[in-house]
Amino acid sequence: LSVATTDGLSATGPRDLKAIRVSARALSHDTVAERLAAELEGGGERLLSEREIVSTERAAGERMLSAQLGGGRFHRADLIRLGEDGEPVEAIEVELTTKGAERLDQLLRAWRQAVAEKRLRRVVYRCTPRTRPFVERAVQRTRTESVIQVEGL
């Protein structure tokens, strides 16, 4: 795992990104998301990482790639898959731990709204064997099967 320093970002990266702090809690999730991104990009896919999503939204002056949760809160996907035209096609969420049912349902409904607003075409949840049943039940509960796909990692 490598992380750009402030000097490294100044020399090569978008000017609006700050150096990140690595936490033990997020390390496993970030590592899996980055491995998935490397695999997809190695297969020819074009992606935005969560940090690139932040940069894109800041440059546009709006949160067009995030799911709106209400109360002025937003949620960004771990990755956004881009189409051949560079337009966002799919939000990709990596789920390694179970979330509470209420929180997960809120996220799924917010993603359904983002798809309804044509900001994305679909959302894919990539899950561990442990988390997949929880996400699948939430998709059924929220009736989001038409816009949210659940796959294994």
Image (cartoon, rainbow, N blue to C red):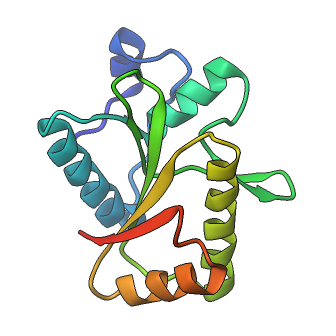
User: Which quadrant of the structure image shows residue 75?
Assistant: bottom right
Closest to the observer, 103 or 149: 149
- The residue depicted at 39 percent of the width and 17 percent of the height is 13
Closest to the observer, 133 or 1: 133
Location of residue 63 with respect to 151 vertically, above or below: above
Q: Residue furthest front?
A: 146
Closest to the observer, 116 or 131: 116
Q: Residue furthest top?
A: 11
Q: Do we see residue 1 in this rendering?
A: no
Location of residue 137 with respect to 44 vertically, above or below: below
Tally of numbered discs = 0
| Residue 40 appears left or right of 104 | left
Location of residue 66 with respect to 139 vertically, above or below: above
Q: Residue furthest right?
A: 71
How far across and down, in percent of the image, does residue 3 sit? 30, 37
Q: Residue furthest left?
A: 42
- The residue depicted at 37 percent of the width and 18 percent of the height is 7
User: Which quadrant of the structure image shows residue 82?
Assistant: top left
- The residue depicted at 47 percent of the width and 81 percent of the height is 135
